[in-house]
Amino acid sequence: MSEAVRIAGTAHARFDACAPRCANCRYRAEDRHSLEQSIPGLAVFSSGFGASVADSRLCRLHDQLVSPDDTCAQHDPIPRH
């Protein structure tokens, strides 16, 4: 017999989608090319666009790499149009 799989309700999914994460923060530089501009020589090591960077991006507020699921107290959501 297979085990039952529990699916999260829509309220839980909505909370996850709207949670204050770096992925939806205006300070996260979405463009991967901004990493090379901010960290000179990064692309020389073939890491600037490889798996070592993955979905990490530059936080323009803190001047550091952040993952999409990271959070901080200065989170400022991207306005939806």
Image (tube, rainbow, N blue to C red):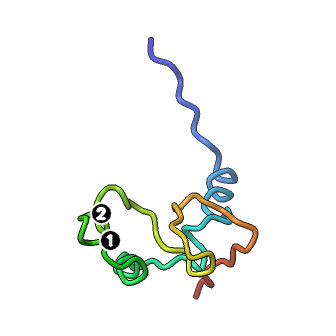
Q: Quadrant of the C terminus?
A: bottom right
Image spot of residue 79 (x, y percent): 62, 84
In the shown orientation, is residue 21 left or right of residue 38? Answer: right
Identify which residue is drawn at 54% across, 70% down.
Answer: 64
Q: Neighbour class for label 1 at 10 Å: few (<14), some, many (≥20)?
A: some
Image spot of residue 65 (x, y percent): 51, 67
Q: Earlier in the sequence, mark 1 or mark 2?
A: 1
Q: Look at the numbered disc 1 and give the secondary structure of its residue.
A: helix
| Vertical order, 50 against 29 (above or below) | above
Q: Look at the numbered disc 2 and give the secondary structure of its residue.
A: loop
Tell which residue pokes out farthest to the bottom in this image.
Answer: 81
Distance from disc 1 to disc 2, alpha carbons, whole Å, reads 6 Å
Viewer-proximal residue, 34 or 41? 41
Q: CB under 8 Å between callouts 1 and 2?
A: yes
| Vertical order, 18 against 27 (above or below) | above
Image spot of residue 59 (x, y percent): 55, 75
Q: Quadrant of the N terminus?
A: top left
**What's the amino acid at mark 1?**
Leu
Tell which residue pokes out farthest to the front in this image.
Answer: 41
**What's the amino acid at mark 2?**
Ser
Identify which residue is drawn at 57% across, 58% down.
Answer: 69
- For residue 42, the mark is 1
- Residue highlighted by disc 2: 47
In the shown orientation, is residue 52 left or right of residue 46? Answer: right
| Vertical order, 16 against 75 (above or below) | above
Identify which residue is drawn at 70% across, 65% down.
Answer: 72
Identify which residue is drawn at 40% across, 76% down.
Answer: 39
